[in-house]
Amino acid sequence: MNVDIKNIQRFIVVGDRVLIKPESEESRTASGLYLPPGVTEKEKIQSGYVIKVGPGYATAAPPEDEPWKSTEEKVKYIPLQAREGDLAIFLRKEAYEIEFDKEKYLIVPHSAILLLIRNEDLFE
């Protein structure tokens, strides 16, 4: 997984979305036949590594008990399960593909992620 972290830091993932770097697609079958480009894009599920995670699901601000106090409305979020570095298996049809610095990335809603595989040793 070669990702230029400096450029990726400029991305701000919004809401309940996750930025995923798809795993390299296998262009050859087990029997040795080469597949044309686009065949693997028709698969229903795909996997990739989570690069960035949005803040989560926005929640409503609680009602103020003391209306005379100055109110600073701070948006609160319910965090997502996905973390940076997780391997995500997700529904391909829900993903939006973008290209940045000649690399393909996918923006996937958290609800389209079916399974996360986390390597705890990676962060320690």
Image (cartoon, rainbow, N blue to C red):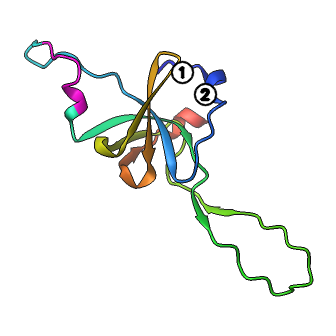
How far across and how far down the image is residue 41, in percent?
Answer: 25, 30
Instruction: Answer above or below: position of 91 versus 85.
Output: below
Q: Contact (CB < 8 A) between labels 2 and 1? A: yes
Question: Residue 103: x and y, percent?
Answer: 46, 19
Q: Is residue 35 magenta?
A: yes
Separation of residues labelled 2 and 1 (CA atoms) = 8 Å
Residue 3 badge: 1
- Quadrant holding the C terminus: top right
Q: Earlier in the sequence, mark 2 or mark 1?
A: 1
Q: Which residue is mark 2?
A: 8
Choose top left, top right, bottom left or bottom right for residue 26: top left
Residue at the image point whose x is 63% and y is 61% from the top: 77
Per the picture, the main secondary structure of the magenta-coloured stretch is: loop
Relative placement, left or right, of 69 versus 92 is right
Q: Is residue 85 magenta?
A: no
**Element under label 1?**
loop
Name the residue rendered at 61%, 52% in the picture: 55
Which amino acid is tagged 2? Ile
Q: Point out the stretch of residues depicted in magenta.
A: 34-41
Q: What amino acid type is highlighted by mark number 1? A: Val
Horizontal side of 72 relative to 98 (left or right) equals right
Q: Nearer the viewer, residue 67 or 21?
A: 67
